[in-house]
Image: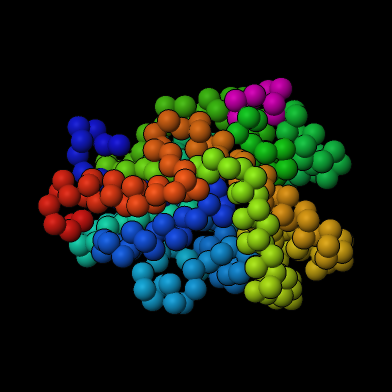
Amino acid sequence: MNAGGAPPEAVLLAGPTASGKTDWALALAERVPLEVVSVDSAQVYRGFDVGSAKPGPEVRTRVPHHLLDIRDPAEAYSAGEFVADALAAIRAIRARGRLPLLVGGTMLYFRALVHGLAALPTAEPRIRRAIDARALQLGWPALHAELAARDPEAARRIHPNDAQRIQRALEVLQSSGRPISDWQRGTAPVHGLRLARWALVPSDRAELARRIEARFEAMLAGGFLEEVRALHARGDLGEQTPSLRAVGYRQLWDCVVGRTDRATAVERAKAATRQLARRQLTWIRADGGWQCVDPMRPGTREQWLEAVLGALRQRGPGPG
């Protein structure tokens, strides 16, 4: 967990969508004075509430949350910005004598915080436009296949429909002549924080799929489609807007603009959410630094709570 058994300065809780991370975080909050730092690339956006499972006012009143509603949906938000914002939140929380608990499923953000960011080449708009034009003609899966031939290591970590990351990997290749996976080796975090890292890894994948289905139906009942309609009604967002690449949002957007019917959009969104869960688990398994626990096994949450409390006791009373 930490070198030399030193106590953690922040606790990380990752896991796939619908694995129960929020409930675990709230259970820990009943035992420890803490504040949550969201690690979620959709929850940073204002108006992305129902579909991102953003904690509601009641939860945020009980437990302070950070990095929610910090961007307009028309704006981009990068992993580098997340690291800077998360570190600022961690420092402020610790200064208040409380424990920073980082919770979410955006594994790219976790990786950037834990392992650091590569000093990648700057964006090349001309190259990006050319890649986008080819994607319109051939489709992103075809460009993913091209990436797999040129940088198989990066392609294994990127879904064939993940347009943003495929674009960036090909852009780096073309602008520098080096694979992005080569650039990403040897990175180091910019902080010296001791981090205790746990990940929820459900053993019953069929049950996880059922939970994903039930949660998505609950989101629809809670106004998810109406939320996407409201985003569309703004008039300044489009399919290439980074925020609308969020799973669920982009599928329901197709329904709102008339490209698909509601039933088709819902089924595609559920399938995309299941695919997201698989990608999240792949990220976790690829990094041996996560302590994996099964949220579906009886008694696991209580054992995790005791493990966290035991780690914190090493530093005396209170997490500060």
Residue 110 painted magenta? no
Residue farthest to the left, as pictured: 316
Quadrant of residue 103 in the image? bottom left
Left or right of residue 199: residue 320: left
Q: Main secondary structure of the magenta part?
A: helix
**Residue 82 place in picture, x, y as percent:** 45, 53
On the question of residue 239 being in view, the answer is no
On the question of residue 243 being in view, the answer is yes
Residue 148 painted magenta? yes
**Residue at 35% across, 52% down:** 302
Left or right of residue 56: residue 163: right
Comparing 110 with 289, the one in front is: 289
**Residue at 17% across, 50% down:** 313
Query: In which quadrant is the C terminus drawn?
Result: bottom left
Quadrant of residue 132 in the image? top right
**Residue 131 place in picture, x, y as percent:** 75, 40
**Residue 283 place in picture, x, y as percent:** 53, 37
Residue farthest to the front, as pictured: 298
Comparing 168 with 229, the one in front is: 229
**Residue at 77% across, 60% down:** 266
**Residue 63 place in picture, x, y as percent:** 36, 69
- Stretch of the chain drawn in magenta: 147-154
Query: In which quadrant is the N terminus drawn?
Result: top left
Seen in the picture, residue 199 relative to 176 is either above or below; the reply is below
